[in-house]
Image (cartoon, grey):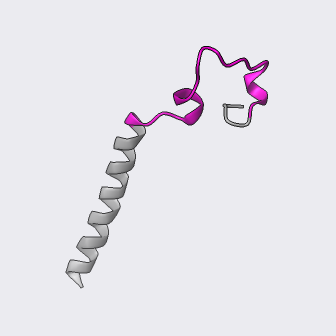
Amino acid sequence: MKVFVVALVFAGLSAVGVSALLDTYQKPSYVEFTTGGARVGDPGKNLVGPG
């Protein structure tokens, strides 16, 4: 039973750590896939941008 509890705690801590790590490296799609040639009138109305 102790091994199972330790495994659950390890899985939880690993998930939080990997989530924090990926949060620093990954960018949202509206930032990553923008180009200088894209013409958007109002980015607030765009479905992939912040708004």
Q: Which residues are magenta?
A: 24-46
Residue displayed at 34% across by 50% down:
18
Query: Image check: 16 left or right of 4?
Result: right
- Comparing 12 with 49, the one in front is 49
Residue furthest top in the image: 36
Residue displayed at 37% across by 53% down:
16
Quadrant of the snapshot with the C terminus: top right
Residue furthest bottom in the image: 1
Q: Quadrant of residue 5?
A: bottom left
- Comparing 28 with 6, the one in front is 28
- Comparing 3 with 31, the one in front is 31
x, y percent for residue 11: 31, 65
Position of 7 relative to 50 (above/below)? below
Query: Image check: 11 left or right of 44?
Result: left
Instruction: Tell me, yes or no, whether the highlighted magenta stretch contains residue 44.
Output: yes
x, y percent for residue 24: 38, 35
x, y percent for residue 10: 26, 64
Residue displayed at 43% across by 37% down:
26
